[in-house]
Image (cartoon, rainbow, N blue to C red):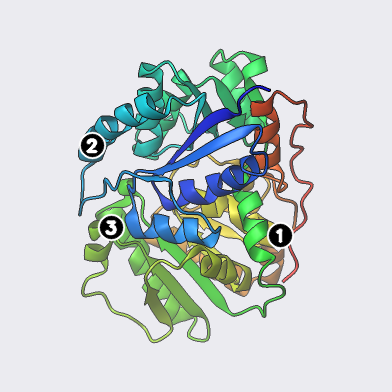
Amino acid sequence: MSHPQRVLVVVGTRPEAIKLAPVVRRLRQEPRQFDVHLCTTAQHRELLDQALGAFGLTADIDLDLMRPDQSLSEIAGRAFAALDPLLARIRPDWLLVQGDTTTAMCAALAALHRATRVGHVEAGLRTGDFRAPFPEEMNRRVVDLVADAFFAPTPRAVAALAAEGVAANRIHLTGNTVVDALLEVAALDGELKPEDLVLITVHRRESFGEPMASVFRAVARLAHTFPATRFLHLVHPNPNVMEALRGRETPENLEFSPPLDYTSLVRRMRQCRLILTDSGGIQEEAPTFGKPVLVLREKTERPEGVEAGLALLVGTDEERIFEETSRLLNDVTAYRAMSEGGNPYGDGHAAERIADVLAGRPFAAFTPALLSPVSI
């Protein structure tokens, strides 16, 4: 009998943990096929631990690299130094990384240096601009340069990889694992009562400074204009975000909260009316529940939601944010147009398809927009 494939899964941030948790859990259902080692760099410490805990997971290896207000180069240097001896010790058959973080980029390059095969979950996302989002666009391209298996979430991602010369037999259309995670967590709560609530998250590096200040001014204006609506801003712990909020006026119906654990975040997404965010993951999650998304970015590597009419790019301009949010809160027809339709990002079976690929089994590729919004 052959030995199981040794798979090293490396995560550093909460989105990585959420999107790779279904993969880890699925692979561990086949202990004769897969020997899974879960490693965290702790690029984001508290948020990462919360996310893993939501899925009953703890790290087998914790590199504990987080430092207060660390620079990208500092985390990269420590990650390379820690990951190389880990790869030498474990000698995995596969390294799995997700997305576009500094952790993913460093782990993929470290694996290349050790001649270890790399599987990239959520491969092929592109904006075409290395500065938007920054540094994620460069990170994901680096991972795709060295990857051996490309787990693409959508047909657009497949096309992007093909256009860059990736062989078709290395590209696998799986759907996005975030929908697997989302459906699993949502099933725990059952039905929830909707609320007159607008959910807000802002954290992108390219928005630090005046762009972020413009977003916060728009949110305050909206809270004044719609006093019966509750505005819940989940404040990212990055010091640049905290500084941008310091001393700002806070209307009574505008609430600031630390980031929620993933179970609570999913609950709020299900209960709210709409979402203002620069998060990539939330752009993928909201269509599952039929929640319109106003994207606080100039460009998105997830245009499928925009093309389907489920999301709208509004950037960081105060007037544009105020006008578009007001329109959705006032106009029932406009709201309905952005809240009905299938999910173009996943169907809840992405982790199963990834396991099939690693095991060398055939599978049926993801077909977009078959998942209807989940009833709340």
Q: Residue at x 38, y 31 (%)?
A: 107
- The three-letter amino acid code for the residue at tag 3 is Asn
Q: Which residue is mark 3?
A: 238
Q: Is residue 365 depicted above or below 374 in this figure?
A: above
From the viewer's side, name the closer residue of 252 and 135: 135
Residue 39 visible? The answer is yes
- The three-letter amino acid code for the residue at tag 1 is Ala
Give x and y (percent) for residue 47. 39, 59
Find numbered disc 2 in the image and state the secondary structure of the residue it sits on.
Answer: helix
Q: Which residue is mark 2?
A: 78
Q: Dividing the image into 4 quarters, which one contains the N terminus?
A: top right
Does 9 sit left or right of 130 as displayed? right
- The three-letter amino acid code for the residue at tag 2 is Arg
Q: Dividing the image into 4 quarters, which one contains the C terminus?
A: bottom right
Few, some or many C-alpha atoms within 10 Å of disc 3 (few <14, some 14-19, many ≥20)?
some
Q: Which residue is mark 1?
A: 337
Gap between marks 2 and 1 measured at Cα: 47 Å
